[in-house]
C-alpha cells in the first residue's frame, strides 16, 4: 500500500512538470508568431453636461442668541413660571426667589429714611432759629448793645446749625440710596426675561433647577433662546477657506427633515484657522421663523463654488494616470478595434463625471471606463456591451 502511494505521487510530479513545460512553450510560440494581445474593456460615451463644483460640509445648529437666566442673589426658588418649550416675552418674570428677608430689609431702610428726614427737618428748624438770632445779634452789635465776643457766639451757633443741617441732609441722601439698594435687591428676587435686541419673544431651551432648590448667585435656572434665526457652524478646510465669501448662498439639509432643505447665507468668516485641524468654523445664517431647526441638530451644508454649463464630460473612472505622471483617457477608435491614449486637463468633477478642458472635439466619442489600466497606447481591445454609467449632474442629450 505504501509503495503504491509513492508511485502515484511520483507520477503526479512528473505530470505537473510536463504540463508546465508545455504551457511555457505554447506561450513562447504565440509571442514569437506575432499573435496580438487583446484586452476586454467596457466603454462609455463622452457627452456634454452641466457640471457644478459643490462641496458638502458638516456642522451643527446654534441659536442666534442664547443666555442663561440666573439670579444675582442667592436664595430658595419659590416658583418657576415657565417650562421647556414655552414662549416668553421681554420683561416676563421667569422665576421668583423667596423674598421675605429682602422685604424686611426694604421696610427697615424705609424707617431709617424717615428718621433721617425727621432729623433733617429738626436741623432745618434749628437753623431757622439760629438765623433769626444772628440777625438780632447783628443789629445789637451795630448799636453796640452786645460785645464782639457775644456776637461771635451767635455767629458760631449759626455755622454749627448750618453744619448740622448739611449732615442731616447727607444722612437723608444716604438713607435714600440705601433704600434704593434694598429695593434693587428685592427686585433681584424676580428673575426676568431681559434682552436688548431682536424679536419680542423667545423660547425656553432648558430648565436646570426646580422650585424649592437653593440657588446660588449666577447659577442658571432656565436658558432663553432666540431661534427665529439660527446659525449653522460648519468646518471649512484650508483648501476651500479662501473661496468662502460673506453673503454666499448655502443649502442646508438635516436628517430631521429628509425631504426639506433650508436656505442660508455665509454670515461670519473667522480670521483664524485652527492649528490642529486646519479648519475654520464658518457661520451660516438661516431664517427659521417656523422654528423647525433646533440648536444641536447635525446638518450638511452644500456650497457651490463654480459651475460649467454645457461642458464636455467623461466618466471620472475613465481618467488614468500614466507612469510618467501624465493624466488622460483612452479613446476608442471608430471601428472599436483599438484604444488610443489622449492627455487631458481636468476641470470640475460632479457626480462621477469630470470636465475635459479643451476637449470640445471629444463630445460623442467612446472612452474606456473599465480595463483601461491594462492598456497601452494603440492596444487592441474587445468592447463588452454593458449599460451606460450614471448620468452627469445635468447631462445634455
Image (cartoon, rainbow, N blue to C red):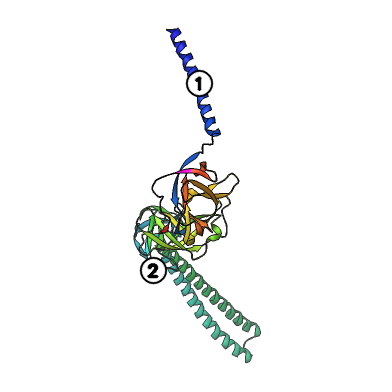
Magenta range is: 381-392
Q: Is residue 249 above or below residue 37?
A: below
Q: Main secondary structure of the magenta part?
A: loop
Which quadrant holds the C terminus? Answer: bottom left
Please identify the quarter of the rendering in which residue 74 is found.
Answer: bottom left
Q: Looking at the image, can residue 296 be seen?
A: no
What quarter of the picture does the N terminus occupy? top left
| Crowd class of label 1 (few under 14; some 14 to 19; many from 20; radius 10 Å) | few
At 56% from the left and 49% from the top, the residue drawn is: 327
Locate residue 358, reporting x and y percent. Answer: 54, 59
Q: Which disc number belongs to residue 200?
A: 2
In this view, 169 is above or below 374: below
In primary-sequence order, the first of circles 1 and 2 is 1
Q: Are marks 1 and 2 in contact (CB under 8 Å)?
A: no
Nearest the camera: 241 or 19? Answer: 19
Q: Kindly give the residue lying farthest to the bottom in the view shown.
A: 143
1 or 2: mark nearer the eye: 1
Alpha carbon distance from label 1 to label 2: 94 Å
Q: Residue 330: x percent and y percent? A: 51, 48
As drawn, which residue projects farthest toward the front? 33
Q: Between residues 158 and 313, which one lies in front from this camera angle?
A: 313
Percent x, y for residue 157? 58, 79
Relative to 47, residue 138 above or below = below
Q: Residue at x 60, y 88 (%)?
A: 138
Using a 10 Å C-alpha cutoff, classify the residue at mark 2 as few (fewer than 14 neighbours), some (14 to 19) or many (20 or more).
few
234 and 351: which one is in front?
A: 351
Q: Which residue sits furthest right?
A: 148
Secondary structure found at label 2: loop
* Residue that appears at 58% across and 85% down: 134
Q: Which residue has dot 1 on it?
A: 18
Q: Is residue 391 magenta?
A: yes
- Secondary structure of the residue carrying tag 1 is helix
Amino acid at each position: 500500500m505504501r509503495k503504491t502511494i509513492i508511485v502515484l505521487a511520483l507520477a503526479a510530479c512528473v505530470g505537473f512538470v510536463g504540463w508546465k513545460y508545455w504551457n511555457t512553450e505554447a506561450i513562447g510560440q504565440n509571442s514569437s508568431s506575432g499573435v496580438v494581445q487583446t484586452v476586454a474593456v467596457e466603454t462609455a460615451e463622452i457627452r456634454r453636461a452641466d457640471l457644478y463644483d459643490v462641496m458638502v460640509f458638516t456642522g451643527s445648529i446654534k441659536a442666534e442668541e442664547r443666555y442663561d437666566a440666573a439670579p444675582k442673589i442667592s436664595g430658595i426658588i419659590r416658583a418657576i413660571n415657565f417650562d421647556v418649550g414655552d414662549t416668553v416675552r421681554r420683561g416676563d418674570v421667569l422665576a421668583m426667589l423667596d423674598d421675605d428677608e429682602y422685604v424686611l430689609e426694604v421696610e427697615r431702610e424705609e424707617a431709617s429714611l424717615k428718621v433721617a428726614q425727621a432729623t433733617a427737618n429738626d436741623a432745618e428748624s434749628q437753623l431757622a432759629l439760629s438765623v433769626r438770632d444772628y440777625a438780632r445779634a447783628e443789629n445789637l452789635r451795630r448799636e453796640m448793645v452786645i460785645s464782639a465776643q457775644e456776637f461771635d457766639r451767635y455767629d458760631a451757633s449759626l455755622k454749627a446749625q448750618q453744619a448740622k443741617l448739611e449732615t442731616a441732609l447727607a444722612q437723608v441722601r444716604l438713607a435714600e440710596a440705601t433704600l434704593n439698594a434694598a429695593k434693587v435687591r428685592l427686585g433681584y428676587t424676580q428673575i426676568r426675561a431681559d434682552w436688548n435686541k431682536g424679536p419680542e419673544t423667545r423660547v425656553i431651551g432648558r430648565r436646570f433647577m426646580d422650585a424649592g432648590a437653593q440657588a446660588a448667585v449666577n447659577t442658571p435656572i432656565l436658558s432663553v433662546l432666540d431661534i427665529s434665526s439660527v446659525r449653522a457652524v460648519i468646518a471649512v478646510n484650508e483648501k476651500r477657506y479662501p473661496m468662502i465669501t460673506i453673503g454666499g448662498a448655502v443649502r442646508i439639509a438635516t436628517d430631521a427633515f429628509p425631504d426639506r432643505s433650508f436656505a442660508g447665507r455665509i454670515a461670519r468668516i473667522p480670521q483664524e484657522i485652527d492649528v490642529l485641524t486646519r479648519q475654520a468654523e464658518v457661520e451660516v445664517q438661516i431664517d427659521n421663523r417656523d422654528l423647525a431647526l433646533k440648536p444641536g441638530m447635525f446638518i450638511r451644508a452644500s456650497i457651490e463654488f463654480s459651475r460649467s454649463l454645457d461642458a464636455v464630460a467623461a466618466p471620472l473612472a475613465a481618467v488614468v494616470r500614466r507612469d510618467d505622471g501624465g493624466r488622460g483617457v483612452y479613446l476608442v477608435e471608430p471601428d472599436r478595434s483599438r484604444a488610443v491614449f489622449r492627455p487631458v486637463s481636468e476641470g470640475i468633477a460632479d457626480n462621477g463625471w469630470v470636465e475635459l478642458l479643451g476637449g470640445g472635439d471629444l463630445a460623442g466619442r467612446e472612452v474606456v471606463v473599465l480595463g483601461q489600466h491594462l492598456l497601452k497606447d494603440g492596444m487592441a481591445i474587445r468592447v463588452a456591451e454593458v449599460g451606460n454609467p450614471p448620468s452627469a449632474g445635468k447631462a445634455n442629450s
